[in-house]
Amino acid sequence: MATVKLDIALPILQWIYSSYAEKIDENLTMKINTWISGAQKPTFTEIENLSKKTKIPFGYFFLNEPPKEDLPILEYRTVDSAEIANPSRELIDTVSYMEFVQGYLREFRRDIGYGKCEAVGAGKNLSIQDFTKRIREVLTLEKEWYKGARGELFNLLRSKLEDVGVVIMKNGIVANNTRRALNYRGFRAFTMIDSYAPLIFINSTDTNNGQIFSLLHEFAHILLGESNFYNARISGTNTSRNNEIICNAVTAEILVPSDIFCVKWEQERDIFKLADYFCCSAIVVARKALDSNYINQSKYDDVCKFVIQKADESREKRKEQESGGNFYNTAKSRIDRNFLEAVYIGVSEGKITYTEAYRLTNTKRTSFMGLIDQMALGGVV
């Protein structure tokens, strides 16, 4: 019996080649070229294989034109950039999963009578000073909150945000697939606003200091009551969006209080030592110094260039040394504890199946229960 050959529209083949050629092996790329040229036609098995390799839904191959997979979240992007002009399959799937997470927790919280998140919109129409004060009040942060929490600032902030109902998810890959890395140049974080389950996603391929900045920055957007797609470097100063300027200023003030900074600058005019004191990026300190007229633009640019270069080098070194790590430690860092508990309650009460629970949490039977034990759940969601 002859092998059935499929007629795939040329625009589809061209779209796949231009968008995914770098992510598949050379042999498969050569095959696509032969299909585009018309020299050969693909078989069902070849298209099925290509679908698995690229993560493109199988049905897309039989359309006449490439699908328009618009991501509404990109409407809130910080700056325009080539990296997200055509969102990657990894970004599309990550946003889709976060919508899944948020949708489940929203309905769960509404069903159990959980009130709306009071932080949403709580910072509207406030001055920078009052906005900063509001964040400190909501998160119960002292002005010098960074003291005594060295190395644990992200987890401290995350815990406080989860306590007020914000969902914090974090990953550097799609689900648990190490071959589907998120592009750290594409975005640093995004926020999906919701009255019951406002969600912040942190790209863990960013530096530790970058993740802390992003977490506070995105929480500021929640207090403004708006979604956000954060795809600018900390050093970026070219935004014209008023709310973005506000969020940057408030975040910097939380990390480096101006009055304390001025005193410290007189004592120690070393940007990198001050960054170590405030437990933040040297770029944030340099920006404070620039805004205070302590340094010029050239000095600021030099600091940014140096920090970004070192961060890129460190990221590459980390990739070379990666050995997988502890599964549960990694899983715990990726998932919001309130969300996980909500899933566990849902399956325990028979409101969802175990299969649905595994899908919601990207786990399997043993790893799901192991994660529940590791997170020591049992409190109020």
Image (cartoon, rainbow, N blue to C red):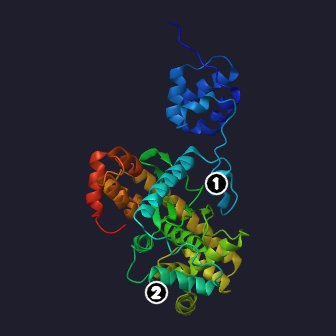
Label 1 – label 2 distance at C-alpha: 37 Å
The tag on residue 381 is: none
Asked whether residue 270 is in view, the answer is no
Q: Is residue 101 above or below residue 226?
A: above
Q: Which residue is depicted at the point 70% across and 30% down?
A: 11
Decide: marks 1, 2 in contact (CB < 8 A)? no
Q: Residue 178 in the image: x percent, y percent?
A: 43, 46
Residue ranking furthest to the right: 240
Quadrant containing the C terminus in the rendered view: bottom left
Q: In this view, does 172 lie above or below 62?
A: below
Q: Foreground residue, 172 or 98?
A: 98
Q: Foreground residue, 5 or 347?
A: 347
Q: Residue 263 in the image: x percent, y percent?
A: 54, 93
What crowding class fits label 1: few (fewer than 14 Cα within 10 Å), some (14-19), or many (20 or more)? Answer: few
- Which residue does the numbered mark 2 point to in the structure image? 144
Residue 376's quadrant in the figure?
bottom left
Q: Residue 230 in the image: x percent, y percent?
A: 60, 63
Q: Is residue 33 above or below residue 338?
A: above
- Say whether residue 77 is left or right of residue 348: right
Q: Which residue is depicted at the point 51% across and 69% down?
A: 215
Circle 1 sits in a helix, a strand or a loop, which is it?
Answer: helix
- Say whether residue 232 is left or right of residue 201: right
Q: Which residue is depicted at the point 52% across and 38% down?
A: 55
- Which residue does the numbered mark 1 point to in the structure image? 72
